[in-house]
Amino acid sequence: MEEVRVFPLTCAVQNYAWGKNGLDSEVAKLVVGGDPLAVIEDGKPYAELWMGAHPKGDAQIKDNRIAQTTLGQWVAHFPACLGSKVKDTFQGQLPFLFKVLSVNTALSIQAHPNRELAARLHAHFPEYYPDNNHKPEMAIALTPFQGLCGFRPVEEILEFLKCVPEFHALVGKEAVEELQCSVGDAVRTSQALKKCFTRMMNCEKKVFVDQLNMLVKRVTEEGAAGKDTSSSNGDLLLRLHSQYPGDIGCFSIYFLNNMVLDPGQAMFLGANEPHAYLYGDCIECMACSDNTVRAGLTPKYIDVNTLCEMLNYSPAPASSKIFPCVQDPSDPCVELYDPPVPDFSVMRIQVPASVKQYTMAPVDSASILLVIDGDAVATSVAALSDVPLRRGTVLFVSANESVSLHITSSSGMNMFRACCLL
């Protein structure tokens, strides 16, 4: 039934062990908001909500007038819903996966390959790299959100090498001296940084476990004596070590920027950018791929050589990793996060309490809308009937359809909308 082109979705939940448990999780709160009959278990992690047509978590269509049961099936039947440009560019596939993440313990230190490397990895190691696509990602904080992202400025890394002898021991005197001598020359710095990181990552297991144990013992004793352990990044070290004892990834905190995003702030993770999410809740949008090269803080396969070869060794301050949003010139309620990749963009729609009628403008792309806060009734020529919107509602909107909201909540609306703006 093609005439219904706007409809609500029931989305897949992933219960990965690193997720927040029960109703501490933003994912769980949104699920129960969207479906008051959903059962949330206290001790169970609710890590990710997947809003899209990914085969490992295809959304269910919540409209009994539609014969197809999942969004993936519906898009395959009616590819025109994507918009003609998107349909042609991405071979009739929805090009993005929209998510909510609720992170309790650290995700692995990782990077995602560009298209060229993805094709090569997939051809040689399909069991670890399941497709040939790139996987750029963008995270937008819903609550204060902590992550590691990109290499720190060299001065900060050198300071840690001076203050943390255990870290210095893993990198080695020769590589440290090269890094010191490279300051001021971007090309040499990048080469020296690669050498330092590669030396550390290829350290013999016994050596790095011994150094890590010495470091943890020292920082714990200093903390107990009331000393300031910030020069060893002590608090974060102990937290990561308690989650992943004996893991080389614990030392990555001395190489990578420690970011804390305020709600609404974003970071964009392009190809070859080292990163790890540590704690908090975020919206995430990404290209449809499962290609991840891991380096630590994980029980999964670690591909050290590929990772060390591929990374972007360009040191930069944490502030430069915050991805800016821009105000939509035609709609004061919309801020646009538009990363430098064609696969996806995200709009944040904040309708103030004073506005009771709001029209979501059509875009030339299929889009997925998530309600974070607020209540409204959505009407659209393409929906054929009213759709109630509340916290946790997920709505699929076909290309070039507008949706009118009659807002009933007293505090306005807060929503995110993922689409593909070619």
Image: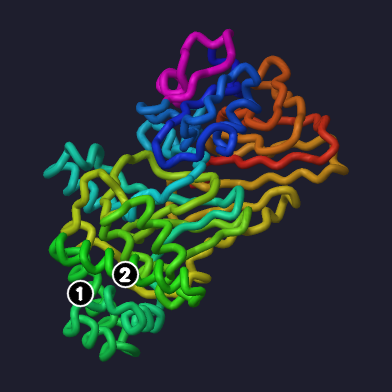
Q: Earlier in the sequence, mark 1 or mark 2?
A: 1
Residue nearest the observer in this picture, 131 or 41: 41
For label 2, the SS is: helix
Q: Is residue 399 visible?
A: no
Give the residue displayed 36% in from the left and 28% down from the top.
Answer: 56
Relative side of 39 to 95, left or right: right
Camera-nearest residue between 277 and 1:
277
Q: Amino acid at mark 2?
A: Leu
Of 39 and 178, nearer the camera is 39
Q: Is residue 232 visible?
A: yes
Question: Which quarter of the figure is the N terminus placed in?
Answer: top right
Which quadrant would residue 14 be assigned to in this image?
top left
Q: Which mark is residue 195?
A: 1
Please report the bounds of the magenta region as a residue range.
58-79
Residue in the image at 85% along x and 41% along y: 355
Q: CA distance from mark 1 to mark 2?
A: 22 Å
